[in-house]
Amino acid sequence: MPRTEIDLPCRVERLSILDEHGELDQSLEPDIPDDFLLKMHRAMLSGRRFDERLLNLQRQGRIGTFAPISGQEAAQLGAAVHLRRDDWMVPCFRESLAETWRGKDPASALLYFAGYDEGGRPEDDRNDLPIAVPVGSQTLHAVGLAWGMKYREKDSVAMTFFGDGATSEGDFHEAMNFAGVFTLPVIFVCQNNQWAISVPRSKQTRSKTLAQKAIAYGIPGIQVDGNDILAVYTAVGEAVDRARKGEGPTLIECETYRIMMHTTADDPKRYRSEDEVNEWKKKDPIVRYQTYLKNKGLLTDKDIEGIEEEIKAEIQTAVEHSEKMMKDSGDPLDMFLHTFQELTPALEEQKEELSRELSERRQEADHG
């Protein structure tokens, strides 16, 4: 028998609407109300300034390590804006902007980064899972939620975020396969920021795109300019609409860049060049979006100055509120209450040691 070619849906599109020079493809421009365009701009700018303040606080020793989002604002927000309250968002560890859009109190984020687990607990009325540090594991959680929603015949969706490094993990492929087999309402949003800590994307896969990995699982995949919020908004909107209609999952690869470090425990200068970073800074998603809004007559430099002042005050309020919560937090010895019914000798020793140290600190404070 002769060899025959198998007909496969192997085409992968790339979507860009607003390029780094502010040039707009008007034929692809999404129809977004003016007030919502401005709301997204404010959220993006707030996310960037909050990121910068977090870095200052970390360097001052007032919070612990965290994963900066600078440069990835469009990829997060352009996706998260499509979620309803009954939808589920399943983040990894770099979605602080998406979380605050969904209603997370910035003071809670500060509390969490300072080492207080209470800050990582989503509010009862927010269908978001806590952050997931193990790379790629959250994709399976999103698929489970989507399966449950389909079983209950809801038109809700689950959206999960992850980086390019997660596409090298088995969890990601298991999640994609399961979602494809059962036609689940889940949106896979890959923030391809070019680096899995210190491993470049070129050393992770031979695939020309990450979006094409969807083809193997029989689901749609698309690559978008992740620094173009209009492109992200459009692609994710289409994916969410399909999922709500019962047409299954989508993989969206957002090509973006991590301007800062992987986490504040990382030194990116050891593995990437300043020239590379500077080239990506020219594609800044916020500057690009501001140019677009100015060209539409919706935003001026004076407007931006006013918004900057408002955001600065809001962040300061969140910092003060979080630090008050830290001072008013419960007894540190409570950490030993929920480990074992009867403490092991080692934990009992640690508890006694901490108790003595806390007592000594209180005495010093009383005589200080």
Image (cartoon, rainbow, N blue to C red):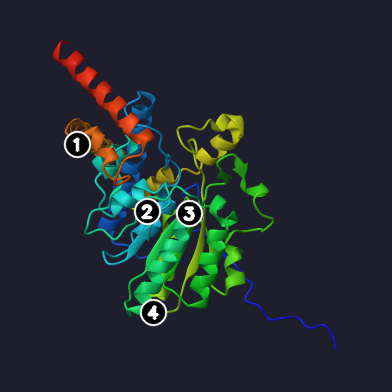
Disc 4 to disc 1, C-alpha distance: 47 Å
Q: For the residue marked with disc 2, what is the amino acid?
A: Leu
Report the label total: 4
Residue at screen point 67% across, 58% down: 207
Disc 3 to disc 2, C-alpha distance: 14 Å
Name the residue furthest top: 367
Residue at screen point 47% across, 71% down: 249
Q: For the residue marked with disc 3, what is the amino acid?
A: Phe
Q: For the residue marked with disc 1, what is the amino acid?
A: Gly
Q: Does dot 3 land on a helix, a strand or a loop?
A: strand
Q: For the residue marked with disc 4, what is the amino acid?
A: Lys
- Mark in front: 2 vs 1: 1
Q: Position of residue 333 (x, y in %)?
A: 25, 34
Disc 4 to disc 3, C-alpha distance: 24 Å
Name the residue furthest bottom: 1
Mark 1 sits on what residue? 330
Disc 3 to disc 1, C-alpha distance: 33 Å
Marks 2 and 4: in contact by CB < 8 Å? no
Of the numbered discs 4 and 2, the one sitting upstream in the chain is 2
Q: Residues within 10 Å of mark 1 (few under 14, many from 20)?
A: few
Disc 4 to disc 2, C-alpha distance: 23 Å
Name the residue furthest right: 1
Residue 127 badge: none
Image quadrant for the N terminus? bottom right
Q: Is residue 211 above or below residue 220?
A: above
Residue at screen point 35% across, 48% down: 97
Quarter-of-image position of residue 311: top left
Q: Residues within 10 Å of mark 2 (few under 14, many from 20)?
A: many
Is residue 220 visible to us here? no
Q: Does dot 1 land on a helix, a strand or a loop?
A: loop
Residue at screen point 19% across, 35% down: 317
Mark 3 sits on what residue? 162
